[in-house]
Image (cartoon, helix red, strand yellow):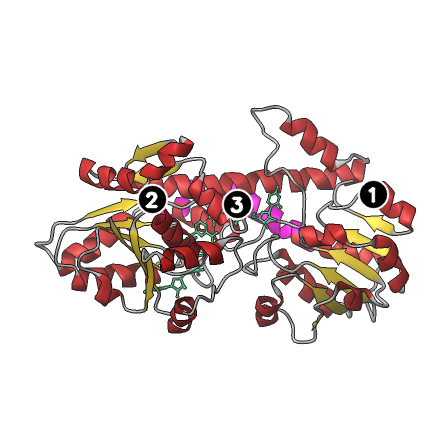
Amino acid sequence: MRVTMIGAGYVGLVSGACFAEFGANVVIVDKNSGRVNDLKKGLIPIYEKGLDDLVAKNVNNGRLEFQTKLSNNINGTDIFFIAVGTPSRRGDGHADLKYVYQVAKEIGENLNEYALIVNKSTVPVGTARKVKKIIADIKPDLTFDVASNPEFLREGSAIEDFTNPARIIIGVENQRSEDILRDIYKPLEKVKTPILSTNLESAELIKYASNAFLATKISFINEISHLSEVVGGDISAISQGMGLDERIGEKFLKAGPGYGGSCFPKDTLALNRIAQDHGVSSKIVQAVIEVNSNQKARMVKKITKALGGSLKNKRIAVLGLTFKPETDDMRDAPSLSIIPELSKKGAEIIAHDPAGIQEAKKFLPKDIVYVEEIDKGIKDADAVVLITEWDHYNKINMEEIIKLMKGNIFIDLRNFYDPELMKQIGFEYYSIGR
Ligand code: NAD
Ligand code: UGA
């Protein structure tokens, strides 16, 4: 099977390398020539556990290669996967489909034989049909199919998620397309992955509904965490108590500074827009978005209050910048909302992150100081704020940390540490919902 994966981002690179590992011959095409040149030299442009070894292995066995020009890789391909970005369109929250449509146009202009064109990008309902129309308008006599195969991998565990997924969703219009997609995912029979085949619209909506549902769980627990804090509860116990009911489930019930990342924020906005476009109400999704935004603002208030109401000339050491651990992705990270506000209020910010500093520099105010070593950041700090729960921070010797600080305030926005232990060490310790 010959696969052309368009887009060498988090999804394209991981999916392309995994399909090669499954046995397909894969060309990953990206218009970013710097990225492709790096990949050709064996340099992986994103931080993702295990990806370097997987890419190297499949390049060496000849099943994986990288190209910049899609037009050179069109004929002879059995399946095209479109895995380009679908960011929020500036100002209105709609998914911006210009990259997807550009790819469809390039395929249409160059394809001369049957192929299956599959959307792996997260795209609004109706996009697969639009892709089909773009290609058909250019080549009215060409036989081809389109399909929707949304991707559910998470950053930080992307390879594991791709090779042992909860499900594969294939939205198709006919048996031929379904057979091709079932064939490429055949190796997943070993891990008994359910494959659900649907129509195009359902597949497209399953993706948004799944992300919005997970975001709903997070906003729900974040709202309860506020109440818990006020009434003297412990949100960790509350999540555990709720999660023990299998109908609720323990996952995605961890209170924190609000969800971030390249998907939940943009996909909840886009789902809201899709509903509006079809004249349907989406009150729950709107509330989820609002609660998430309030949660980030509440974190700023919490930090300010812990520091006595004013941040003027307060030195704050921040641990963790990325939207979650085990990634260098800074897209919509809660730190991007919280840190500029602290800085505006007069705080001096010294930030540490195990993988995200380079990306963070592109988005955070220029006066933020970054440190590679935690000790340097902590020295003389009035307070420490943990924003992202990297495992790395579990290994810190807190007794040493408190000695280096000027103050003793520790604000843990992920409930990562044991409150009793932190208090015993001498911290004035604050966390979420407890
Ligand atoms: P990304 O921004 O990391 O990568 C997209 C890549 O596509 C870029 O390298 C860009 O240069 C390339 N590209 C854009 N237009 C191109 C063109 N015309 N030809 C060739 N290359 C082109 O994006 P991502 O995070 O991998 O997300 C891709 C899609 O997958 C999005 O729709 C996203 O919502 C969805 N998704 C992402 C994740 C995730 O964890 N990041 C998980 C599931 C689904
Ligand atoms: C998410 C989904 O989990 C994937 O299934 C999906 O494929 C992907 O979006 C996508 O469409 O791109 P990802 O964004 O990588 O994956 O990360 P998650 O682990 O879902 O975390 C998202 C955000 O929610 C993070 O900021 C995380 O800290 C936060 N979160 C997560 C919580 O605050 N509490 C939780 O209990 C879980």
Instruction: Tell me, for residue 149, which label it has, or none.
Output: 2
- CA gap between label 2 and label 3 equals 26 Å
> Does dot 1 land on a helix, a strand or a loop?
helix
Q: Is residue 283 visible?
A: no
- In the image, taking residue 313 as reference, residue 20 lies left or right, namely left
Location of residue 373 in the rendering, given as x and y in whole percent from the top left corner: 74, 66
**In the rendered structure, does residue 294 fall within the stretch colored magenta?**
yes
Circle nearer the viewer, 2 or 3: 2
Tell me, yes or no, whether the two marked residues, 1 and 2, touch with CB atoms within 8 Å: no
Q: Is residue 236 visible?
A: yes
- In the image, taking residue 225 as reference, residue 35 lies left or right, namely left
> Mark 3 or mark 1, which is nearer the start of the sequence?
3
Decide: is 15 above or below 244: below
Residue ID for mark 1: 419
Q: Amino acid at mark 1?
A: Pro
Residue ID for mark 3: 286
| Magenta-tinted stretch | 275-295
Residue drawn at x 20%, y 53% as measured from the top left = 133
